[in-house]
Image (tube, helix red, strand yellow):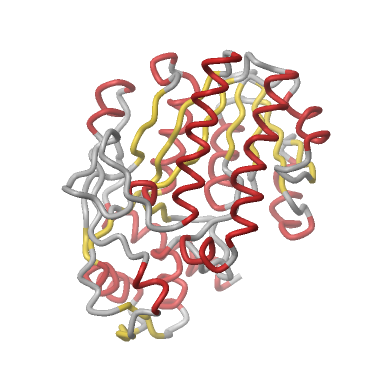
């Protein structure tokens, strides 16, 4: 990545801040596009002191994107509306941001920079309720929310623009990332970070139902490594990869572990909200054999060690 021109759309979000920090460490010349510099003023100032350009911009702003994509070698698209339930409660925003926004980006690349490599952040929600575990990339998709359908549609956009216009891309279907960088106020996604915030504050860790549902959690540092490998490897062109740990843990066992590590908080079982219950995907564990065999990537941070690090980080941040 040394000397590469890199645009990170959504670079002040949870995954984005961690990715940008790593890219800068590797010597990339990074530009961040964010919907609001003011909302992340502290992080913006820190990045700008390190020579990173931070500009306001919306994924749906064709003029802004046309100017930003010129000369870029890699474009990481981490932006968009997040959250399964939110997409059902506000389908029009999810449609506008996650579909129209990605078309605006692809049109800007078609017109001004077809040589750039796009790395798109997909989601394990695209699989819906899986038929079997672990879930490979070629598993049938049974999406249960509009967010998942829109993510899957963007994959089809990418395939089309690659076929017609030569736009290069890779897709990271990320499972459940956790780690430093997620604000306390973000509750629509990032369940581990949300539970850790609750535990540190000695508040209830609310678990829907009995908490038996299993999930595949991956530390954000491992996600960042996967995204960078995908951006630099020709083998990743036109491919979609599960970015996951490949192991699962039940929600209730996860919550118990967090309470134990934090030494605070307590578990509180609550009834499933009706909409959340309707779109619940059940157990999910990803098959990561494709990314391991094709790109040589695999996760390096076990869940126990990752939880220790994450609790320590947020506890230190709470004391500042």
Which residue corresponds to the image point at 49% horizontal and 24% vertical from the top-left? 159
Quarter that holds the N terminus: top right
The residue under the point 47% across, 72% down is 197
On screen, residue 177 above or below 268: above
* Rendering coords of residue 212 (x, y %): 20, 70
Q: Position of residue 173 (x, y in %)?
A: 40, 40
Q: Position of residue 300 (x, y in %)?
A: 30, 40
Say left or right for 81 vs 39: left
Q: Residue at x 44, y 21 (%)?
A: 238
Percent coordinates x, y for residue 258 in the rendering = 31, 70
Q: Nearer the viewer, residue 49 or 57?
A: 57
Q: Is residue 166 above or below residue 269?
A: above
Image quadrant assignment for residue 270:
bottom left
Query: For residue 297, what is the image quadrant?
Result: top left
**Number of disc labels:** 0
Which residue: 76% across, 36% down? 53
Q: Is residue 146 left or right of residue 63?
A: left
For the C terminus, give its image quadrant: bottom right
């Amino acid at each position: 990545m040394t000397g590469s021109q890199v645009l990170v759309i959504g670079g002040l979000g949870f995954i984005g801040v961690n990715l940008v920090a790593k890219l800068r460490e590797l010597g990339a010349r990074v530009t961040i596009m964010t919907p609001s510099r003011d909302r992340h003023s502290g992080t913006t100032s820190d990045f700008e002191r390190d020579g990173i350009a931070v500009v306001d911009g919306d994924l749906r702003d064709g003029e802004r994107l046309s100017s930003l994509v010129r000369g870029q070698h890699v474009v990481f698209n981490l932006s968009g509306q997040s959250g399964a339930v939110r997409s059902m409660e506000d389908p029009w925003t999810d449609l506008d941001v996650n579909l129209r926004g990605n078309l605006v980006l692809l049109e800007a690349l078609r017109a001004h920079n077809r040589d750039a490599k796009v790395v798109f952040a997909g989601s394990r929600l695209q699989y819906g309720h899986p038929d079997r575990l672990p879930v490979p990339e070629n598993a049938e998709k049974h999406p249960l929310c509009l967010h998942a359908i829109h993510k899957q549609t963007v994959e089809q956009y990418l395939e089309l623009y690659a076929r017609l216009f030569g736009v290069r891309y890779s897709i990271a279907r990320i499972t459940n990332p956790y780690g430093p960088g997620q604000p306390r106020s973000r509750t629509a996604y990032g369940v581990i970070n949300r539970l850790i915030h609750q535990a540190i504050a000695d508040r209830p860790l609310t678990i829907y139902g009995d908490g038996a549902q299993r999930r595949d959690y991956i530390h954000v540092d491992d996600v960042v490594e996967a995204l960078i490998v995908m951006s630099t490897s020709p083998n990743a062109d036109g491919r979609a990869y599960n970015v996951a740990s490949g192991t699962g843990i039940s929600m209730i066992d996860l919550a118990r572990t967090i309470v134990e590590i934090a030494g605070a908080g307590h578990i509180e079982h609550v009834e499933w909200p009706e909409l959340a219950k309707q779109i619940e995907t059940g157990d999910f564990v990803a098959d990561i054999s494709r990314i391991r065999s094709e790109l040589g990537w695999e996760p390096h941070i076990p869940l126990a060690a990752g939880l220790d690090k994450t609790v320590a980080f947020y506890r230190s941040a709470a004391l500042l």
